[in-house]
Amino acid sequence: MRRVAPALEVLVPLALLGLWAAWSASSDTFYYPPLTDILETFNETWVFERVGSDVVPSLLRLTAGYLIAVVLAVAIGIPLGLNRTARRAAAPIVEFLRAIPPPALLPLAIVVIGVGNSMKVALIAFVCLWPVLLNTIDGIRGIDPTLRDTARVYGVSRLATLPAAAPQIFAGMRTSLSLAVIMMVISEMVASTNGIGFFVLQSQRSFAIPEMWSGILLLGILGYALNLLFAAVERRVLAWHREAHA
Amino acid sequence: MLEVRHLSKSYGDTPAIGDVDFAVAEREFVSVVGPSGCGKTTLLKCIAGLLAPTSGEVKLEGDRVMALVFQEYSRSLMPWLSVRKNVALPLRRRSKEERARLVEEAVEAVGLRAHLDRYPWQLSGGMQQRVAIARALAYQPQILLMDEPFASVDAQTRADLEDLILEVRERYDVTIVFVTHDIDESVYLSDRIVVLGPSPTTVKEILGVDLPRPRDQVETKELPEFARLRAHVYRLIKREEARVAP
């Protein structure tokens, strides 16, 4: 199985791509151009023509929004996790804000913050905040009482809190990462002048269908790569957790 | 040096500790025994300052440092830290050299020198408890509180750890308050035994253990005095249990 698995991980996607290529090769439908056309456009567009103008701005917004969310969520989550009264007081607010579909905030954000980068970063941060926040609160609450007492006796509560809750915080961060990509695209589709989301919508509006497809493909690849990167970081930071529970 | 004065503790309306009153002298080894569920752990947590007593007080002579060793060794060690860092954890305010020396000494005392760079979850239960003991010793407490520290290890390991604790007690010149439900263990280790009654607990009797030191797992336990003390404590606890049971 161990030898088969990596082979499958490469072969199955390749086979699917092959199927797509074969099925679309003779396509003359405007909206479903042959895969080869899409790949060719992909190559022309993203290697590396529009990297500076669209990919970099997108990734910068994503990174900024995501990091702001993680820092805020952990900073707010720790006191809420430690204090039952604070948690109770905050719960309705958290539940309410979390329930708002973030794209609904776009019009408001444009009015209040404007159409620039800050608006997009703010929206990405808003989306990413909740999963990390809720997981931080839960992670802190779930710290083993014995571990907590031990840390208190030795006066190292502050030192022990974050690592003990880290596995759950990371679970929240993983969820947020996908949301960050989604929100990045949505925010770039409205009142924007660059970014991958902007490019995809702009291509569709100007009937540049292979370009539109190439943008979608790029987003998929980016999301996948970000997840791999995240998994690598997680594996490193939480090595103890994985091995302790192996 | 340590006085427990008319201490009582209730959780809401449920009384856990009725009225407990005893004193511990410098360098004394005092065991606290009692029927299960009588509030021994609660008492120890009150002494350690982890719980506030409902009434009464714990009086410490001077500025004494206390360390606490729990029964659940696997949950009181930080799984993300190596043995070395676990032992060094309470020492972060000391200088680097002093920290290294204290860790070295403590690890040496419990016979874990070879495992300094391993992680707690790579060690057996008995070894994990040695790490917890080393951490407590490195903290250089005047009073070492132990909450059924050997209840979760096998019989042979338990005997080894009992002898270890008697040894390090001499070496570190430390006062020990030792909670256990094992009567043999309390007689074997102690200078005095505090026998508690069922919940809400009170002190039933405090008896001196006049067995020669150093103690020996075979010879000490062969002494008629050992048998007499053992039987005496046993009857005290059984009688209390019988009185409570319908």
Image (tube, coloured by chain):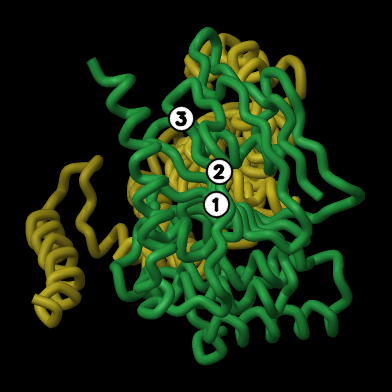
Chain colours: A yellow, B green
User: From mark 2 to mark 3, how far is it between C-alphas?
Assistant: 10 Å
**Residue visible at 35% across and 45% down in the picture:** B234
Q: Earlier in the sequence, mark 2 or mark 1?
A: 1
From the viewer's side, name the closer residue of B201 and A195.
B201
Q: Which mark is residue B31?
A: 1
Residue A128, quarter of picture: top right
Tag 1 subunit? B
User: From mark 2 to mark 1, how far is it between C-alphas?
Assistant: 6 Å
Tag 3 subunit? B
From the viewer's side, name the closer residue of A237 and A99.
A237
Left or right side of B117 for B91: right
Q: Relative to B211, is B197 above or below?
A: above
**Residue visible at 20% across and 56% down in the picture:** A34
Q: Secondary structure at mark 3?
A: loop
* Residue B129 in the image, given as x and y percentages of width and height: 47, 67
Total labels drawn: 3
Tag 2 subunit? B
Residue B36, quarter of picture: top left
User: From mark 3 to mark 1, how far is it between C-alphas?
Assistant: 14 Å
From the viewer's side, name the closer residue of A179 and B22.
B22
For mark 2, what is the residue?
B194
**Residue visible at 91% across and 49% down in the picture:** B62
Q: Secondary structure at mark 1?
A: strand
| Residue type, label 2 | Val
State the quadrant of the C terminus of chain B: top left
Left or right side of B231 for B200: right
For mark 3, what is the residue?
B197
Residue B25 visible at all? yes
Q: Relative to B125, is B145 above or below?
A: above
Q: Are marks 3 and 1 on the same chain?
A: yes
For label 3, count other residues whose C-alpha is less than 10 Å away and answer few (under 14), some (14-19) or many (20+): many
Discs 2, 1 touching: Cβ within 8 Å: yes
